[in-house]
Amino acid sequence: MRTTNKMGYCILFIFVVLVMSQNVFGLGVTPAREIVYYEPGLMQTVEFNLINNENKEMEVSLYAQGSLADRIVLGQNSVKFGQWEDSKTISYTFILPEDIEPGVTETEIVAREIPNILASEGTFIGSTVAVIHQFHVMEPYPGKYVIARLKIAETGKSDSINFIVPVQNFGTLDISKVRAIIDIYGPTNEKITSIETSEVNLPVGSTIDLTADWAGVINFGKYSARLTVIYDGETTSVIEKVFSIGGASVGVLGIQVNDDFSLGEIAKFNILVESNWPESLNEVYTEMVVYDLDGKEITRFKSSTESIDSMGKEELIAYWDTAGVEKGEYRTNLIVHYDELTVSQDLRTEVSSNSIDFYLIDISGDVEKSGFKFSTTVILISVVAILIIGNIAWFVYFRKKKK
């Protein structure tokens, strides 16, 4: 009987650990970024939601840091969460200066958990959980100016790599011709080839994706891509990005939104990722960028950051505040960050009053609906059921043995 008691305690312990592991993501913030276009003296109040993923009592300090920190007034310097209180609305008011440098001026609102022992003593030291809400002020450059990024879409093939170059006209004049050149270098920094995108026009304030394919016999290994964008006789600075063929990669198995989602509320995403690498990968996270059908960015948000064991799977948690989002079709770029590399996947996203569905778009343009229905609750129940059955079996066995 002592053995069966020990088994019972063991099962109880495992059950508690499993329940507690459901909420290990600390603080969350949504939306992760507020973008404002510059107007001299502009004053507005902004709100975002602070998420208590652990459903516990805690105190969180709030402060601003960055270029416009002195222009931001927080509605409160700290907030307290009660037990099972899952979110708080945080507000801040900004007043823009009369003059600002062209470009993107970045400021951060930091929310940092105060450990209970320190909160009671009225001090704040040490390393604790913190999340950041970004406040970006956009001021176009006079004349013609292009902002560009480089994305590398893994096709799953060793003979074709797709490069995507989102370019935005961040100046005050239209651009008649813009194109991109991508130089590809091998592991020893030798130049392998150059590929070029088509040439298009780019009106003021618009964004467009330029694409180019690297096709042929491609050996496994790490490569670097150096991007140069040429527009109306001018050139952007070179952007460099490292990518690998046949090396470590992390794939998205599926995305699940919370079952009780309602449009206008905060959507919680469970993003299941899998590593094919025989070593553990640290600091793995996803970033989701949502665009309307005209290519205008609606929002972007990041998931929790986790480590993935060798050849393992991990669930990443992300939040999207859908307040003000209308029902309809959107385009989402899902980016997985790992080992200083990225993999991106374009998704067609359908938002309804009580669901968000994602459709995978492969390189040929075909669409396949993501059938991901992963649930940690289902796994928890299954594991506990197996353990209970095992405990009963052990009980019967020892009872028969005693007789």
Image: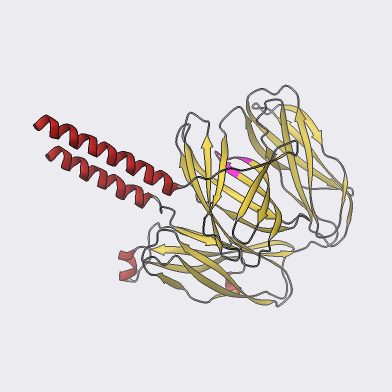
The magenta segment: 336-343
Question: How was the colour assigned to the protein in this rendering?
Answer: secondary structure
**Quadrant housing residue 369:** top right
What residue sits 61% from the left and 54% below the top?
356
Quick check: 151 left or right of 133? right
User: Where is residue 158, by image quadrant?
Assistant: top right
Q: Residue at x 74, y 42 (%)?
A: 164
Q: Position of residue 144 (x, y in %)?
A: 85, 57
Image x and y of residue 161, in percent: 71, 32
Image coordinates of residue 303 in percent, x first then y, are 54, 51
Residue 106 relative to residue 394: left or right: right
Which residue is nearer to you in this view: 100 or 26? 26
Q: Quadrant of the C terminus?
A: top left
Q: Is residue 250 a member of the stretch shown in magenta?
A: no
What residue is rendered at 72% in x and 47% in y?
Answer: 149
Please state which of residues 362 and 138 is positioned toward the viewer in this rendering. Answer: 362
Report if residue 337 lies within the magenta region. yes
Q: Quadrant of residue 99?
A: bottom right
- x, y (%) of residue 146? 79, 53
Left or right of 15 in this view: 95: right
Q: Is residue 124 above or below residue 377?
A: below
Most frequent secondary structure within the magenta stretch: strand
